[in-house]
Image: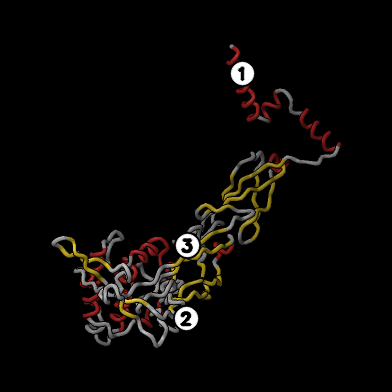
Amino acid sequence: MTIKEDYYKVLNIPKSATEREIKRAYKRLAMKHHPDRNKNSKISEKKFKKIKEAYEILIDPKKRSAYDQYGHSAFDQNSSGDNFQENFTHSSDFGDIFGDVFGDIFGNNQSNNSYQGADLQYNINLNLEEAVKGCTKKIYIPKLKICSLCKGSKIQPGTQKENCRTCNGNGNIHMRKGFFTVQQTCPSCNGRGSYIKNPCNNCNGNGKIKKSKKLLIKIPSGINENDKIKLNNEGEEGTNGAASGDLYIKINIKKHHIFTRKENDLYCEVPICFTVAALGGNVEVPTLNGRLKLKIPPETQSGKIFKIRGKGVQSLRNRFAGDLLCKIIIETPVNLNNSQKKLLQKFENSIQGYQKKKNNPRSTRFFDSVKKFFDNLTM
């Protein structure tokens, strides 16, 4: 498994770097290591790929946020080093760099009638074991796809849109008010300048059709409640050739019958009989990877918590494992027969007087405090 270099170190910038600082760092390093300036240099080519990959992640606010929270594992679902290499070609020249960087800095934006597709969210339910160990899930996403018959135009093939009669296809109308003429959006066509007389029969004039898409989702080990996995371009399709939106998989983890998770630690209650609590012994406790023995020292009190290091959840961010914390619950015996009751009574009789204070110091202190409290009330 190849360990990727930290993107901030690749661009030689601090984690607090602004968007402008990221662009400047990318421009400086990209110009230095671009393959066109370093012919036949495999080292420069490899370095340039790292620089470009780091820039594309850190310049995007959503991707940067995901990277800051989960590191490189945030993008294991959609990309890898091999995919990046396939998308990279030597046709990238200095003009690409100037266009990407300076175009953003100086606001060189182009407007058209294309709109990126909407982002989608899918809530997926996992049990604790799936979240801790990771898994692959098959899901079906309902989404709107561009109509295959009308290609999103909303009109029946072989027909055309007709000009709006109210605005004569201009999209605007002019209203005269006194000495002034005011232009406003046409109320009949809402500024489109045309209307559809013959809507597409396949999509009923919507331009899109509801369909379900099957996806295999890789759930990374250590993911937690409310975490999200981003799948690029798996949202709704854009219009007029624009990019599709993204799909966000939100994680919901079902309640476990033994463990409770807090961050990367696991908690569980371990019931023991009062003889083991008093005399000490070994009990078996569960972990997500099997059982292990826990040594109970003599005179253990109910509520005592034992920490077993490294038996919690492995962190998604830094791969360190949390701890398992076992809370001891001393169980009172039930369904006693007469012989057992007599033995317990005999034991109780053996610790009366001074011995009781010695053997049960906590209860003795409590009832002494209660007596003192009521004595003060009657004074």
Residue 120 position, x and y percent, is 45, 67
Q: Residue furthest top?
A: 379
| Callout 2–callout 1 Cβ contact below 8 Å | no
Find the distance from the CA under tag 1 to the CA under tag 3. Answer: 55 Å
Residue displayed at 86% across by 37% down: 339
**Crowd around label 2: few <14 · some 14–19 · many ≥20 (10 Å):** some
First reached walking from the N terminus: tag 3 or tag 2: 2
- Label 2 or label 1, whichever lies nearer to me, is 2
Q: With 153 as the anchor, is 173 left or right in this view?
A: left
Q: With 277 as the anchor, is 264 left or right in this view?
A: left
Residue displayed at 26% across by 76% down: 168
Q: What kind of residue is marked 1?
A: Phe
**Crowd around label 1: few <14 · some 14–19 · many ≥20 (10 Å):** few
Q: What kind of residue is marked 2?
A: Asn
Q: With 182 as the anchor, is 118 left or right in this view?
A: right
Q: Residue furthest front?
A: 178
- Asked if 254 appears above or below 39 in the picture, the reply is above
Residue 51, visible in the rendered structure: no
Residue displayed at 41% across by 67% down: 119
Find disc 2 in the rendering and name its residue.
201
First reached walking from the N terminus: tag 2 or tag 1: 2
Find disc 3 in the rendering and name its residue.
316
Find the distance from the CA under tag 3 to the CA under tag 2. Answer: 49 Å
| Callout 3–callout 2 Cβ contact below 8 Å | no
Residue 278 position, x and y percent, is 69, 39
- Label 1 or label 3, whichever lies nearer to me, is 1
Residue 374 is labelled as 1
Where on the picture, by quarter, is residue 348?
top right
Q: What kind of residue is marked 3?
A: Leu
